[in-house]
Amino acid sequence: MAKCTAPVRGHRTASGAAACPVCGGRYGRYSGYGSYSSPSYYSPPSYYSPWGSGGGSRSRVGGSGGGTRPRWSRAGSSVAYTSAEVRALTPIRESVERRASRPELRDVFLCHAWDDRGGAAKELHDLLESRGVSVWFSEKDVVLGMPLLREIDKGLASSRVGIVLVTPALLGRLQAESIADKELSVLLARDLLVPIVHETTYEALREVSPLLGSRSGLSTAENPMADVAAKLAELVAL
């Protein structure tokens, strides 16, 4: 026995109704059903967005896995985000927007282990600056002879967002309660912190710093450093 295809395909057009083995003859006789649609058989969109009906673009971006485009991502951007990344970065973006009236602030304060200053930290710094992001980076912002802790305090106070490059070296420094631990304490208190996990895992981070490990961020295990920098650049762009 022939079955109506409306529950699966819907009869939203005359051609769709005509193709149904049950309804084809009936709808074919009435030209008035040319734009017929049934709300009972609405097909949901192929994407998901956490923004709801008023939260900006909801188009899919990226490769085969798709993703969610956040509202701060500009038209034509090729940067792909997961829904989890959008949720994690949204509060940071809102803080950036609230501080937009202070152009004297740096975009980013880069917290890193001393051991990474010439490696991963410099790589991330250079990638960000190549995208027009102003970065407070101890290697260039602390002059020889200046009191380090005081300069770090000033850098933290004059930056919109803090990013923490979490590496095996940083985990070792945190266990030793180094200067990096002080920087993290201030950033955590301000709630303006994006962890960037590099060559380690969130599980290892949580063992050393459960509070920092509870913060969602970005990981170079899922995106190369250049892609992480692209996301951060979009995040702080005003």
Image: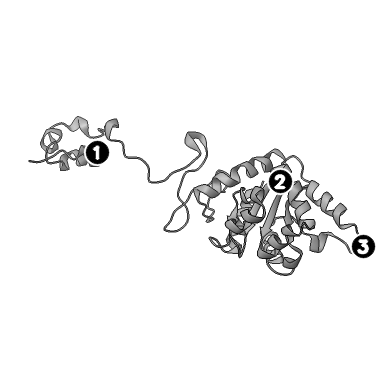
Mark 2 highlights which residue? 188
Q: Residue 101: x, y in percent?
A: 74, 39
Q: Quadrant of residue 63?
A: bottom left
Q: Residue at x 52, y 37 (%)?
A: 55
Q: Where is residue 176 shown, x and y percent of the image?
A: 76, 60
Q: Of discs 2 and 1, which sits in the foreground? A: 2
User: What separation in Å lies between label 3 and label 2 (alpha carbons)?
Assistant: 28 Å
The residue wearing badge 3 is 145
Of the pair 129 and 228, the residue shown nearer to us = 228
Q: Measure the alpha-carbon separation of dots 2 and 1.
A: 51 Å
Q: Mark 2 or mark 1: which comes first in sequence?
A: 1
Q: Which tag, 1 or 3, sits closer to the chain's start? A: 1
Say whether residue 48 is left or right of residue 184: left
Could you say whether the residue bearing mark 1 is in a helix, strand or loop? loop
As shown in the figure, which amino acid type bears the numbered disc 3? Gly
> Which amino acid, by three-letter code, is at mark 1?
Gly
Q: Which mark is residue 222?
A: none
Say which label, 3 or 2, has the lower sequence index.
3
Disc 1 and disc 3: Cα gap in Å? 74 Å
Q: Which residue is mark 1?
A: 10
SS type, badge 2: helix
Query: Residue sitting at 43 percent across and 56 percent down?
Result: 65
